[in-house]
Amino acid sequence: MSGNYRNIAALLAALVFLPLAAKAQTVDDVIAKNIEAHGGLAKLKSVNTLRNTAKLSFGPFRATALQENKRPDKVREEVAIQGLAQVQATDGKTAWQVSPFEGRKDPQLMTAEDAKSLIVDSDIDGPLVDYKAKGHKAELMGHDSVEGTDCFKVKLSMKNGDVRYYYLDTDSYLELKLETQSTVRGTLQENESYFGDYEQVDGIYFPFAIEQAQKGSSQRQKLTVEKVEINVPIDDSRFTMPVLKPQALAPAAAPSK
């Protein structure tokens, strides 16, 4: 092949692969489009408080669920059934819980390991936003399929040691699935969450249908969001561990005569 023909062949090859190169995206490109798909960084940063009210079902089990967030790093999560409520909360410094289903109606401090997922939930923006500043590392793992839909697969190695795999729809860039790997008391816990029924609330898109399960399990816990409220008043006391009042001492018995 002459030099001219080789040059022409190289040029044609470059033109063929140019569209592929133009479409190549970095992990930061994909994450930026995910943030934009939810409503944009400025809109997300304008959220000071967030309240989600939902119904929870798992087989015959039915409950109501509530999550309240407030900047900075405050969250309160409640699951209520038959007048009793399991509560986990943090004010950004102290994590605590009330566990009436375990016979513990008084608030108790949570260990750092038990509070890992709660601390993650206290990030009102979510781990992908400003992930570098938060000490996380992100990698684009290529493509994968979620129930027949092509997705970008993003691996997030978090500062606390957890690993998350986000499956982002290649068309909408919204989350369709999340896999989490977390080690608690030396035991690896792997869970999956599926997201759907995205709706816009005050310019931000939220999933209104969420299914969760241990990885590999066919039994999923279903969360149906009924209401999302943005920038509603939430008092700081909602996140602060209640101070137990000392029980009044019984009056001393009168001396016998």
Image (spheres, rainbow, N blue to C red):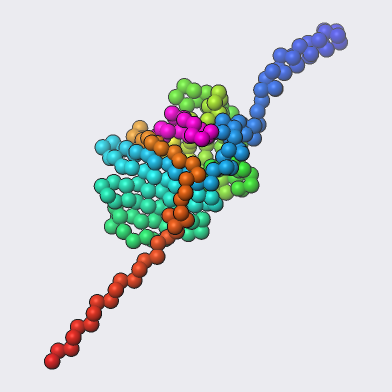
The answer to whether residue 56 is left or right of residue 93 is: left
| Percent of width and height locating residue 245 | 35, 68
Q: Residue at x 34, y 61 (%)?
A: 106
- Which range of residues does the magenta coloring cover? 196-213
Examine the structure image and report whether residue 145 is included in the region drawn in magenta: no
Dividing the image into 4 quarters, which one contains the N terminus?
top right
Dividing the image into 4 quarters, which one contains the C terminus?
bottom left
Residue 243 visible at all:
yes
Number of callouts in the render? 0
Magenta stretch: dominant SS? strand
Question: Looking at this view, is 96 or 248 the one in front?
Answer: 248
Q: Residue at x 50, y 44 (%)?
A: 231
Furthest toward the left, the residue is 257
Residue 183 visible at all:
no
Question: Looking at this view, is 104 or 255 the one in front?
Answer: 255
Quarter holding residue 6: top right
Furthest toward the right, the residue is 3
Furthest toward the bottom, the residue is 257
Q: Is residue 60 above or below residue 87?
A: above
Q: Is residue 24 above or below residue 180?
A: above
Q: Is residue 242 above or below residue 206?
A: below
| Percent of width and height locating residue 176 | 48, 30
Examine the structure image and report whether residue 205 is included in the region drawn in magenta: yes
Question: Looking at this view, is 113 or 118 the one in front?
Answer: 118
Q: Residue at x 48, y 37 (%)?
A: 179
Q: Residue at x 36, y 66 (%)?
A: 244
| Percent of width and height locating residue 69 | 48, 47
| Percent of width and height locating residue 215 | 42, 37
The answer to whether residue 60 is left or right of residue 215 is: left
